[in-house]
Image: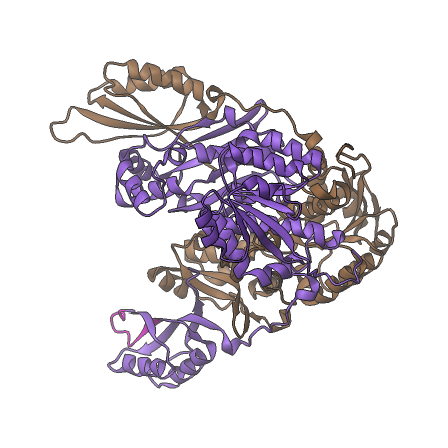
Chain colours: A brown, B purple
Amino acid sequence: MNSNQPSLINVPINVGLLGAGTVGGGTFTVLSRNAAEITRRAGRPIRITRVADKNLELARRVTGSQAAVTDDAFAVVDDPAIDIVVELIGGYGVAKELVLRAIANGKHVVTANKALLAVHGNEIFAAAQKQGVMVAFEAAVAGGIPIVKAVREGLSANRIEWVAGIINGTTNFILSEMRDKGLSFADALADAQRLGYAEADPTFDIEGVDAAHKITILSALAFGIPMQFERAHVEGISQLEADDIRYAEQLGYRIKLLGITRRRADGVELRVHPTLIPARRLIANVEGVMNAVLVQGDAVGPTLYYGRGAGAEPTASAVIADLVDVTRMHTADPEQRVPHLAFQPDAVEDTEVLPLAEIETSYYLRLRVEDKPGVLADITRILADQQISIEAMIQREPNEGEEQTDIIILTHRTREKHAAAAIGKIEALPVVKKKVIRLRMEELG
Amino acid sequence: MNSNQPSLINVPINVGLLGAGTVGGGTFTVLSRNAAEITRRAGRPIRITRVADKNLELARRVTGSQAAVTDDAFAVVDDPAIDIVVELIGGYGVAKELVLRAIANGKHVVTANKALLAVHGNEIFAAAQKQGVMVAFEAAVAGGIPIVKAVREGLSANRIEWVAGIINGTTNFILSEMRDKGLSFADALADAQRLGYAEADPTFDIEGVDAAHKITILSALAFGIPMQFERAHVEGISQLEADDIRYAEQLGYRIKLLGITRRRADGVELRVHPTLIPARRLIANVEGVMNAVLVQGDAVGPTLYYGRGAGAEPTASAVIADLVDVTRMHTADPEQRVPHLAFQPDAVEDTEVLPLAEIETSYYLRLRVEDKPGVLADITRILADQQISIEAMIQREPNEGEEQTDIIILTHRTREKHAAAAIGKIEALPVVKKKVIRLRMEELG
């Protein structure tokens, strides 16, 4: 494509979606909701035009009137109008047949199927290589965290030494519950099932099989070796006792189910098991259903990637990132596959940065005041006049004979101009003895 | 490229390096040390063939006899044999001229220069777009953390709501020291200078300018808007008092210098200032010179990226990742720019996954034993016979009238087969009353 042509193309990329379950529904939702923004990034609209699911009613509920629905997945894979097939069926059975057939038909494939790749990845990638198509699988490891991209592209300068990851949200939730509430494994599992974080048959999660699929994939990416799932050591958390979590804590450790792969001179370690890790490490503080992957490279040192490892929209985030990747490859100027500013040059918007006065944040205020009655009433009145509400307050006990003290106030969110006005008035009070110390505060939650 | 051709090409990509300082030296070192592995990933050798630096002696020391050295950077930029120019000079002066001239000459550019991009990025990217070349800048934000790639590609499905980052290691080190040791700002700064974490003139770091350059770039990438550094609110940490760090702590907060950018209906916030954040957040526990960026997307939720934000090799890691990106674009089958398994298909190695017996790790052992003299001696003898040394041990005080107790042992690293042999012998002791609980332990440090 010549660089003088517009970088946005109106012809959509047509996607065929196999599987209308949780992730399929999330993919449909996010692709619709963020269509404009995704098109600005990809350079071309991405549309799911056909959806296949054995449950036709579910498929229709997910897609509304926006896509043709069928119960025959092979019809989608064989449809010449489909550019990319998204496989969200799971398992090694029909999913494998469908992926290989899509490849044979010259279509690119996006999949979230870690089991399929860990077990049959070598065969699938060889077929894709031969046909000159892409099989993208960001969603297969750690859900919405772009860890495949980080290992495969972001860390490509490094000799990777090891990778260790909390890559199964169900087991991390159970372990967090066992530690926080002193629960047994059985009770924590029941909690997880009640909250929808564990399936009715939780075997694949709790016995470490799901984590083993994912660490197998990361091992291949990190070290440039074939997938070797059949040689992984897999041990889950179902035998873990609450006593050991407590003893570990006393010794300064947390127990996490880690997928670990390490390069040694004589081979590669590939294993999943409950692991004690020092409580002070960042990864030891990853709680609940969150995932995190720690990668040790020889040049960069440790890097950590944290986020949601499962769920409809987080997984859809990874599926769609792969769709954008494929679309950019096929649409944009090949010299500029990824636009410099993430969005296509003619899709950059002239949104203005706001002036400081309009910023919204919470505030920490420290006031040096005379220690006498009525001071606090004056101050809170000024804040109330500016519509600023108080979240917390502490007043330092004055030392023996001291006539001044510190008041610390945490406010709720307000605009900078209101905070500035209030501070000006507070500083004008005769009982306030110094310039007010003002720091901003963000919950980041 | 036809998929039946070999994917490795022997003709090197020729790189011209501008600036032989810390990062330049690191780039040279890492590219040499990991040449084989990088070639397996990129599909083609990447060679620095010319190096320019005003300090010829430094340039010669860095490159040895492996590259031609000059003090004329323009000669490198104008050299038709150079495919990619790496700009590591810094600043807005000659660096800008050199980058624009490289672009005009049709060369791709890799730069770590955040100041240049935050201030002149719009002009530079427009020139690159016109010429059909890439300006890659992973190293400009958060050093070795692949955050540009994450925001620009990994999160492309999301409407990004806000980005908040600890993106200046000098100030984070100073804040960690102030909190840990109760130091004043001036004393913590002196420490940082003594350790080489702060420059002799630390103004750009401590006054927040460096962080503002970086958050300006992230703001443009996240929201699809032009760089607007001139409108950023920039406030550093030089006025911060130890008292406020202490009060914040009492209230459950940590103070960090954050770069923050947030999208609102009426515009974009873009600001750098000391910020109170809840101590329980993962990002609040990022200490010392480490960097971390938290991104909130509407589909994926929060994701966090953590690693070294500065230093020779971490920054080189990002520079070289960009070089691999450009090389893959120009070498590999365009349909398969990034190989499925990170390494080119004919460069995947048949390294075997080791059997469980050969795994090396530390162990947590819990033993239920009779509470009588000599028990510990028997156990430690068995461990010593297997060459397993003990890192820590606790013995539970038996309850009133109880005749058994628990011994917990943490071992140093050993092979699984030695641990298994020792455990077998320990279980055979008559004083050991139950199966030994055995968990693995990793320092991850």
Q: Answer above or below: position of A305 versus B207.
A: below
Q: Is residue A445 visible?
A: no
Residue B405: say if magenta: yes
The quadrant in which the N terminus of chain A is found is top right
Q: Which residues are magenta?
A: B397-409
Question: Residue placed at 35% from the left, 59% from the top?
Answer: A252
Q: Looking at the picture, how far across and down is residue A222, in whole percent?
A: 58, 61
**Which of B357/B175 is in front?**
B175
Q: Is residue B372 visible?
A: yes
Q: Looking at the picture, how far across and down is residue B371, in whole percent?
A: 27, 77
Residue A304: say if magenta: no
Question: Residue placed at 57% from the left, 50% from the top?
Answer: B50
Q: Answer above or below: position of B23 versus B349.
A: above
Question: Residue placed at 33% from the left, 78% from the top?
Answer: B369
Question: Residue placed at 68% from the left, 54% from the top?
Answer: B338
Q: Quadrant of residue A11?
A: top right
Left or right, residue A163 beside residue A429: right
Q: Residue furthest left?
A: A401
Q: Looking at the picture, how far across and down is residue B166, in whole percent?
A: 45, 40
